[in-house]
Structures are given as C-alpha cells and as structure tokens.
Image (cartoon, helix red, strand yellow):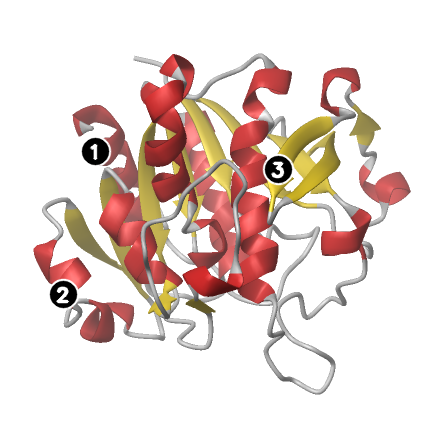
Amino acid sequence: MTKKLFYITSEMDPFASVSPLSDLSVKVPLGLQEKGNDVRCLMPKYGFISERKYILREVIRLKEILFDFDDVDYACSAKSAFLPKSRLQVYFLEHEGIFGELNNLLYKAKNGRFLNDNDKRFAFYCLAAIKMLPNLFWYPNVIICSGWTSALIPMLIKILAKDDKDLSKIKTVYVASSLNEDVVFDSSNLGFKKETFSPFKSLNLNQIGCKYADKTIVVNGAEKVSSKLMKLKVFKDAKNCSIVDLDYGDNTDYSPLLDAIELAIKKI
C-alpha cells in the first residue's frame, strides 16, 4: 500500500554535500519513491544554494510558517524544487538568520571547528519541519529522520501529538548514520514557549532520536557507528532498533537500508 513519507535531511546532493549523508539522502528517497510511495523531502535553504540554477519556486501556502521558538515568535518559509533529473519533490526551509549565512561546510566554521550553535539551529529546523505541515495541507504517514540534524523530530511529534490529532497519527523512523559526538543537545540551552522538553542534559542527539522514534536504524559505513551506539543504555533498551551495514563507495548499494526502512514502515 502506498505510504506518504516525509524525508527530513540536512544534505542532498547536488544542493549541499559534506558527508555520505548527501548521497544517502538522494538514493534512499528515490528508492522509496520507485516502490510506489508518495515521498517528499525537506532540507534547509542554505544561502549558497542557487535558486536560479535549481529552479526553486515559491509556494504560496508556505510563504509564512509561524511558530514560537526559544521564547521568540518566528516566521520562516519554504520553497519547492525537484531533485535534478527526477520527479522527487524537495522543499527548502528558509530563514535567513538561521541558515542563510552558513558556508558550504554546513556544521563547521571555515577553520574546521564545529559551530557551537548547531544544537539550537537544528532544533529550530526540527520544530519548523513539523509546524509547516498544516500549511502544506499534507500529513505523512511516516517521517523519516535522516541523521542527527533531524533527531529531535520524534520527541517533538510525541509532545505535540498530545494536542493535535493529525500529528498523533504520524510514525517516525530515525536513521543514525554518523556518531557526531561533538553535537550534544543541552536542554538548558533552549527554551520553548509551548513545547516542553524532557529534562535531558548533555545527551548526543542520536540518543534522543533513538529514545523517541517508533523505529531506529543504525547504519554502519566506514564509521562503525553501531560499535559505540549499541553500548549506550538508550540503544540497548530500544525495542525497535536494527543495524544495517553499507559499503560506501562510488556506487553504494543502499538496498539493505531501503529494505530495512520498508519493513519498518509496514510494521510501525
């Protein structure tokens, strides 16, 4: 049966690429689309992404997405394009102050140091991804959260679903494909006006994604992610966690991951 799938990522080739996530975030949604699913993708609109080159178009209903974040009223927008040489729709979440000034290293400064506000930036992104759904007039059956930048979505869905019947029907799959031990979520660093976080203190975002997702898939590539993550209590206790091995290269075979996601979608 056809499923509506919302694929959330921070990288997609050719729009933005700094890690294997950019290729994974193309091949996996394309593969899911080829299997007959209604797949739509979301990524940030970084300032260096050319609207003219990739033909980004305004979407009237997505011109003003309003929500509260960190005790401030925010308005962001989203534009739409297709992945080149495909019919895969990609939305670009736009906010000049949050994403517009990032360089093409995305998560790092030009000197190679991790940006110290990554947790706050991508917490904003996760909340905005959910808040845009009413404007989109499209609610997915499953949100696929690809990587640590979308790791807060399963938790936010659980919290917001208590007062929203549309969100309560959405299931989440979290794909952990990188350790990114430098990216730590500190709940004291964020303040949500309406959304209340559990009292996490200095946890890696992978742990939060796993704790709240309906299904977690750990991807082993060159970086043996599972060797560390599966030692953590959150992953040990997770009832719906599986491991997929991928051999990253010029022509990576993503079929094991596609099969794992398809199986998850059917079961959750």
Q: Dots 2 and 3: beta carbons under 8 Å?
A: no
Quarter of the image where the N terminus is located: top left
Give the residue number, with chain letter if any, for mark 3: 68
| Above-or-below relation of 65 to 7 | above
Instruction: Please rate how many residues cluster around mark 1, counting C-alpha atoms within 10 Å: few if below 14, some from 14 to 19, many from 20.
Output: few
Instruction: Please rate how many residues cluster around mark 2, counting C-alpha atoms within 10 Å: few if below 14, some from 14 to 19, many from 20.
Output: few
Instruction: Please rate how many residues cluster around mark 3, counting C-alpha atoms within 10 Å: few if below 14, some from 14 to 19, many from 20.
Output: some
Q: Looking at the picture, which amino acid does disc 1 mark?
A: Leu
| Above-or-below relation of 120 to 53 | below
Give the residue number, with chain letter if any, for mark 2: 233
**In which quadrant of the rendered view does residue 220 lie?**
bottom left
Q: Nearer the viewer, residue 235 or 185?
A: 185
| Above-or-below relation of 156 to 97 | above
Horizontal side of 71 relative to 177 (left or right) equals right
Q: Dots 2 and 1: beta carbons under 8 Å?
A: no
Give the residue number, with chain letter if any, for mark 1: 263
Q: Looking at the picture, which amino acid does disc 2 mark?
A: Lys
Q: Dots 3 and 1: beta carbons under 8 Å?
A: no
Considering the numbered disc 2 on the image, is that residue within a helix, a strand or a loop?
A: helix
Q: Nearer the viewer, residue 200 or 242?
A: 200
Labelled disc at residue 50: none
Q: Looking at the picture, which amino acid does disc 3 mark?
A: Asp
Horizontal side of 134 relative to 230 (left or right) equals right
Q: Nearer the viewer, residue 209 or 43?
A: 209
Is residue 143 something one can see in this rendering? yes
As measured in the structure, the alpha-carbon distance from the residue carrying label 2 to the one carrying label 1 is 25 Å
Residue at (46% x, 38% y) in the render: 195
- Counting from the top left corner in percent of width and height, residue 181 is at 40, 76
As measured in the structure, the alpha-carbon distance from the residue carrying label 3 to the one carrying label 1 is 36 Å
